[in-house]
Amino acid sequence: MAEVPVRPVAARPGPVTIADVAAAAGVSKQTVSNVMNHPAKVRPETRERVQRTVAELGFQPNRVARALRSSSAGMIACRIEPVSSHSLAHLHDRFLHALAEAGQAAGRHLMLFAVDDAESEAATCVRLVRTGSVEGVVLYNVVPDDPRLPVLREAGVPFVCFGRFSEAADASGWVDVDNAAGVAAVVGHLADGGHRRIGFLGFPDGHRVGDDRAGGWVAAMDRHGLLAGSHRLDVRGEDTWTSGARMARGLLDRADAPTALVAASDTLAAGALQAVRDLGLTAGADVALVGYDDTPSAEVLDLSSVRQPLPEVGRRIVEALCGKEKTDPVAALLPPELVVRGSSRHRS
């Protein structure tokens, strides 16, 4: 019997589907499914043609779809970020823990992987979804014009970002924390405590999270009528302990030194705390100090800080990727919480 040729399939973005295989082999989707799952039900010549088509098109059965149909647990994937030896925050570790717990509650498991750069991360995410290893991916540390997003969109990869990737009204697929509101709450707390000169230790311009937190400081200082008297109290540097100490020392050495400092991270705040001590001052009594992210280090140092609602972030992300209502991509901005400790507690 003459071999039946495989019909060409027009190239299109995204993974090869069972419909593509059926069209190329000239059979129904049910026949392709039978060949993959119950080959004895299909005539040998039809089975061979479908198998040849599968090989030529590079079709890879979606194991996740099968697992979901049988009520088995699915998987979601997230890259492990490199750990900085200069940071005390470890926010990423706590986020992954919250994501894993949210996944467990939804009957999903978290797959972690390590790559060197954003390009490799995008390629890995596409491969994991196309092979059916995971049903969706989570992106961390999203930046403006993030190179991962167009790659995943073109490949049809389901994803949700921890962090906003655009201010556009139609931008969706993210869960974020309102960083500006967090810093504004800190300024309000310090202003209520009688502080009029409140300095800000921030990240370099162009860092999305840092810019949001700096914007919260500016807006809140203006709202409390303190911005005009705070000339040159906004200083920026890398998110390291030494940078925080250097910037705080520069402000506190001035004749018109601030009486309170707001740091854009607990790492910067820990450095500032050391600068306060080096000057013979006491945090909370002589200089009020507040950090951001409420890391375990903040509690140990009795440092006031802004706590991100990571359990809620994880739950929203998992729901968006794996929940029953997945037709409308999520766009959620969650409020943080100010945790007051000895470093900024109001004196009676």
Image: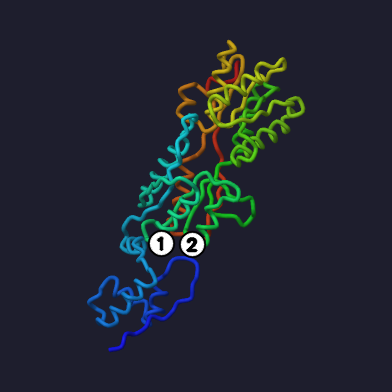
**Dividing the image into 4 quarters, which one contains the C terminus?**
top right
* Label 2 neighbour load within 10 Å: few <14, some 14-19, many 20+: many
* Label 1 neighbour load within 10 Å: few <14, some 14-19, many 20+: many
Q: Which mark is residue 148?
A: none
Q: Which mark is residue 155?
A: 2
The residue depicted at 61 percent of the width and 51 percent of the height is 166
Residue 192 percent coordinates (x, y): 65, 25
Outermost residue to the right = 228
- Which kind of residue does numbered mark 2 sit on? Ala
As drawn, 125 above or below 295: below
Q: Earlier in the sequence, mark 2 or mark 1?
A: 1
Residue 3 percent coordinates (x, y): 32, 85
Judge by depth and name the residue closer to the eye, 171 or 112.
Answer: 112
Q: Are marks 2 and 1 in contact (CB under 8 Å)?
A: yes
Query: Which residue lies under the disc numbered 1?
Result: 130
> In the figure, is residue 170 to the left or right of 43?
right
> In the figure, is residue 243 to the left or right of 131?
right
Quarter of the image for residue 230 reads top right
